[in-house]
Amino acid sequence: MITTLADRIRGLASLFWREVAKFGAVGGVAFVIDSAVYIWLFSGPMHGSEVWAKAIATIVASVFSWVANRFWTFRHRKQANVVREAVLFAVMNFVGLLIASGCVWFAKYVLDLNDKPSLFIAGSVVGLVLGTIFRFFAYRFWVFNEELDAEPAYSHDHEILELHHKEKSAAEAGSGGPATGEFPSIKN
């Protein structure tokens, strides 16, 4: 029982780190898209409107990110209801957009930093890092949150956890189970 539970936990941790790696790769490409659009906008068509330039760059990168995360990073978790998933994704990205644009606003209007390198660092480094941390957990737990039961390797996780909970309850109540040395077997 303990070995099986430990194997499941290692498997879930491995899946989590694979998701982090894929999310990081998608984020790297989205960073390039976001940065290129941001630099182009605030150096050209939106000169003087750095906060709006950051917002538009974030929207463009977010569209790429949704497609890549839906069909690659979290493909085993994508929801059947695409509209609901897209709306949740848009809401979470709006919060991420507010974080990144807020960093540009803070740098420009509170810290009075008006040079392009400072504004770029505020939006595309500090804002993107803070927004990315928020987005990973938002995507993982709210947007792409289908149960792992669809993946055969993890289909019995809920049963193991429920069995462990029942054994613990039985031991605490003194009514057999692990307290008497009898452990039920788990079949995979």
Image (cartoon, grey):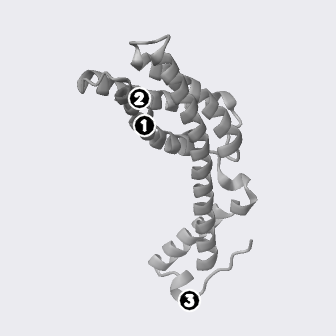
Q: Residue at x 49, y 23 (%)?
A: 38
Q: Position of residue 69 (x, y in %)?
A: 64, 39
Q: Earlier in the sequence, mark 2 or mark 1?
A: 2
Disc 1 target residue: 125
Q: Position of residue 25 (x, y in %)?
A: 61, 45
**Tag nearer the camera, 1 or 3:** 1
Q: CA distance from mark 1 to mark 3?
A: 56 Å
Q: Are marks 3 and 2 in contact (CB under 8 Å)?
A: no
Q: Residues within 10 Å of mark 2 (few under 14, many from 20)?
A: many
Question: Would you say residue 58 is visible in this rendering?
Answer: yes
**Tag nearer the camera, 3 or 2:** 2
Q: Residues within 10 Å of mark 1 (few under 14, many from 20)?
A: some
Q: Residue at x 58, y 24 (%)?
A: 60
Quarter of the picture holding the N terminus: bottom right
Is 168 drawn above or below residue 12 in the view shown? below
Picture disc at residue 181: 3
Please tell me in which quadrant of the rendered image residue 103 appears.
Answer: top left
Q: Earlier in the sequence, mark 1 or mark 3?
A: 1
Q: CA distance from mark 2 to mark 1?
A: 7 Å
User: At label 3, which amino acid type do we have?
Assistant: Gly
Give SS at disc 3.
loop
Give SS at disc 1.
helix
User: At label 1, which amino acid type do we have?
Assistant: Val
Give SS at disc 2.
helix
Disc 2 target residue: 120
Picture disc at residue 79: none
Q: Nearer the viewer, residue 7 or 61?
A: 61
User: At label 2, which amino acid type do we have?
Assistant: Phe
